[in-house]
Image: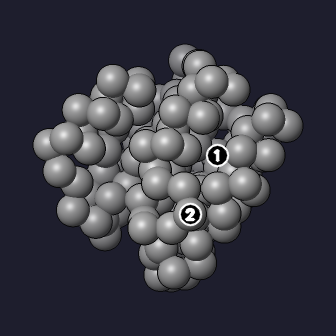
């Protein structure tokens, strides 16, 4: 079975509880996904530059690089990488910016893993 990758991105270890990230790996692995995690904007950018990713999930928080800036940088590196943004309280402005930057969706936190898993499975089938 071929393993595709999803990169779960958190700007800091405090962005979301580790339970959510652990659950993401456990839920996605049987579907053929290998989960990589980064904890800083710099790590995230370096990993995107390495290439080979199938998708990215950005966890919004208030750290060194905000999510929209990070999404802009990711788009400059890989304009086609499917990206989702997870935010605790997404505002209309955040939604508009994310969609302008071609994010697939903005998911309210706590994240609804089932919907994300379905979206990722569809991505693999295409």
User: What colour scheme does the image use?
Assistant: one colour
Residue at 41% x, 26% y is 101
Left or right: where does residue 19 sit relative to residue 89?
A: right
Residue at 23% x, 32% y is 96
Residue 113 seen in render:
no
Left or right: where does residue 31 sit relative to residue 119?
A: right
Task: Say which quadrant the C terminus sits in.
Answer: top right
Res 100 → quadrant: top left
Left or right: where does residue 9 sit relative to residue 91?
A: right
Q: Which-is-in-front pick, marks 1 and 2?
A: 2
Picture coordinates of residue 108, whole percent (x, y): 26, 58
Report the residue marked by disc 1.
6
Q: CA distance from mark 1 to mark 2?
A: 22 Å
Picture coordinates of residue 113, whole percent (x, y): 39, 59
Report the residue marked by disc 2.
64
Res 86 → quadrant: bottom left
Picture coordinates of residue 17, whole percent (x, y): 47, 81
Q: Which mark is residue 55?
A: none
Residue at 62% x, 24% y is 76
Given residues 20 and 1, the one toward you in this image is 20
* Up-down relation of residue 123 to residue 37 (above or below): above
Residue at 60% x, 35% y is 73
Given residues 72 and 56, the one toward you in this image is 72
Picture coordinates of residue 87, whole percent (x, y): 33, 59
Crowding near the residue tagged with mark 2, few <14, some 14–19, many ≥20 C-alpha atoms within 10 Å: few
Task: Say which quadrant the N terminus sits in.
Answer: top right
């Amino acid at each position: 079975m071929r393993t595709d990758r999803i990169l779960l991105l958190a700007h800091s270890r405090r962005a979301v509880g580790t339970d959510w990230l652990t659950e993401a790996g456990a839920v996605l692995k049987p579907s053929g996904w290998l989960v990589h995690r980064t904890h800083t904007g710099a790590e995230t950018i370096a990993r995107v530059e390495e290439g080979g990713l199938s998708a990215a999930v950005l966890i919004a928080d208030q750290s060194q690089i905000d999510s929209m800036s990070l999404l802009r940088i990711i788009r400059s590196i890989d304009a086609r990488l499917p990206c989702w943004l997870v935010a605790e309280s997404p505002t209309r402005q955040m939604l508009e910016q994310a969609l302008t930057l071609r994010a697939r969706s903005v998911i309210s936190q706590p994240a609804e893993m089932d919907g994300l898993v379905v979206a990722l499975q569809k991505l693999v089938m295409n």
